[in-house]
Amino acid sequence: MRKKIVAGNWKMNMELAEGVALATGLNKHFLAEPLKNKEVIICTPFIHLGIVSSLLDAPGLTAGAQNCNDHKSGAYTGEISAAMIRSTGARAVIIGHSERRTYYGEDDTLLAAKTAEALRNGLMVIFCCGEVLSEREGGIHFDVVQRQLERGLFFLPEDEFMKCVIAYEPVWAIGTGVTASPAQAQEMHHFIRGLVSKKYGMAVAEETTILYGGSCKASNAAELFANGDVDGGLIGGASLVKEEFCNIVNAL
Ligand code: PEP
């Protein structure tokens, strides 16, 4: 059975005390209402990561980062390595988020290097892919996603690939309030699983967790998660509000 996951992406939100309060609240919630057969990962800003990782003790609830550097260590002022992330107790890292591809020019080659470095340090990689609106309107969304996965992820040997989760995030749906329809999400997730199957075989494809991200909230989560190839969500804005986020987890 593949893993069911809800990951929160806090992005560049919340000062330290606010983030600690939210993480503490979530931890209490998932101690009182245990996560059965699901995982929840909260991907915080780096500033929060050490303290948040050490305060989480609800089974199934862990912390993750939103980015890592592609180098091991050294003179890279302002950067954070995968080893540093792992040393906080964090378990996962988001790689290839569209905001990093767009605002920081992260290309497929760099993302492949980041993925390899994260895996070398024992982190689960949440690898994001997704098309912009003009690509969907131009009918090339499948080609775009295929290229992103082939270049950023499919260079991995099977055992390393199996430590990765794929997040399909149509860029036109991120932070816009416009969500992919359940049918659009299922169509793309099914396509992605097919690509994984072609590359690594059906057994691996069946074990691969594929998350949907893009304006997913408590009110639409259930219909998105009801699709056979949607194994959970990567949640931005709605992960900043405890009740909303917990309701999304409940919908899974
Ligand atoms: C994201 O940034 O990964 C995301 C899905 O954002 P939002 O839920 O706010 O659209």
Image: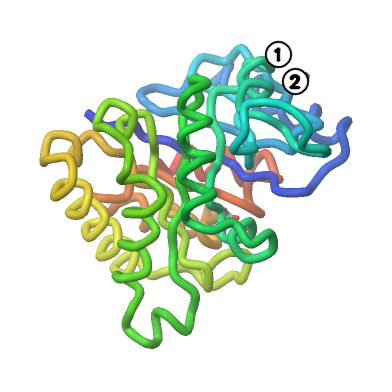
156 vs 233: above or below: above
Q: Which residue is mark 1?
A: 54
8 vs 227: above or below: above
Q: Residues within 10 Å of mark 1 (few under 14, many from 20)?
A: few
User: In the rendering, at what x and y percent does residue 213 appear?
Assistant: 48, 55
Amino acid type, callout 2: Gly
Asked if residue 174 lies left or right of residue 249, the reply is: right
**Which residue is nearer to you in this view: 246 or 15?**
15
The residue mark sitting in front, 1 or 2, is 2
Q: Which residue is mark 2?
A: 50
**Which residue is nearer to you in this view: 83 or 239?**
83
Tell me whether the residue at label 1 lies in contact with that at label 2, contact meaning CB atoms closer than 8 angstroms.
yes
The C terminus - image quarter = top left
242 vs 104: above or below: above
Q: Residue at x 69, y 26 (%)?
A: 73
Q: Residues within 10 Å of mark 2 (few under 14, many from 20)?
A: some
71 vs 137: above or below: above
Q: Residue at x 62, y 52 (%)?
A: 236
Label 1's element?
A: helix
